[in-house]
Image (cartoon, rainbow, N blue to C red):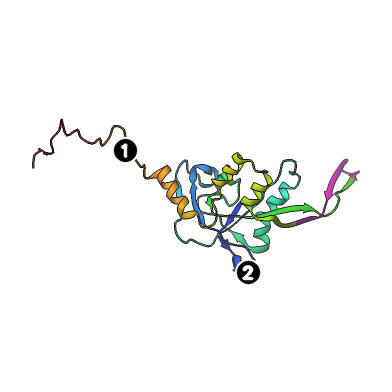
Amino acid sequence: MCCFMDDSKGSSFAINHNATMGICHHDLYDSPQSNHIKEGWSIFPGSETSTHCVGFTWKDGEEELLGNMMYDVSLRNTINKGYLEGVPGSPMCGCVEHMPVVEEAACRTATKTSDITYSFSYSAEEGYVSASNTVGIKYANCDVVDLKSQYVANQGGDAEKVALIDEHLVGAGRCADDLVEYLNEEQFLHQGQHPTKYVTPDTDRWSDLVVGEG
């Protein structure tokens, strides 16, 4: 998945028919090679800079064009549309577990439009044979437009794998709820009473008088 925050050509995501998505939070521990930070976190409450996220998914046995799909969602977007600049603290592109938690992401795919043609040439001067291959490639939106839905469809109802993607693509309008859950469970608030701290005094043993020096 790739997330872009800047459209350097100024034509805007909307003109390119690319939807913008809410960015919820990012655990810096998940991408230390990008941010050079061992631990930490970023949250993005309320409105933020328009961000477009897009990715690809595949079924087992369909790995032949993974490099083409990676090119399509990353460098091709930069060359053709001027998309740049990832979410602060995260890579611009990476496996979803290294990327920020977002509401949704667009989904792209690649298919071959012709047979593969192989070419070979021999250089008598250099004394070696070189080989190359060409094939027509078509890039398009996935059958199911958003990345999460296409991933779920590809997994054939595997509940365990579906639960994994739910942690990273939380659904439209769900960033606020995700932030509450993330901050409560991981960072700030712990509901309930600690088993040894702040115990309610036993009134049979303690009075309600407070004695001390003024």
Q: From the image, tell me which residue sits under label 2.
A: 15
- Which residues fall within the magenta stretch? 122-138
- Left or right of 164 in this view: 62: right
Which of the two marks, 2 or 1, is nearer to us in this view?
1
Image location (x, y in percent) of residue 41: 45, 47
From the image, give the main secondary structure of the stretch colored magenta: strand
Q: What residue lies at 71% left-to-right and 44% top-to-bottom? A: 59
Q: From the image, tell me which residue sits under label 1.
A: 193
Image location (x, y in percent) of residue 199: 25, 35
Q: Is residue 137 above or below residue 126?
A: below
Check residue 4 in the rendering and tell me which mark sits there, or answer none.
none
Q: Which residue sits furthest left?
A: 214
Specify which label sits upstream in the sequence, 2 or 1.
Answer: 2
Image location (x, y in percent) of residue 115: 86, 50
Q: What residue lies at 74% left-to-right and 53% top-to-bottom? A: 110
Q: Which image quadrant for residue 63?
A: top right
Q: Which residue sits furthest top?
A: 205
Asked whether residue 102 is drawn in magenta, I would say no
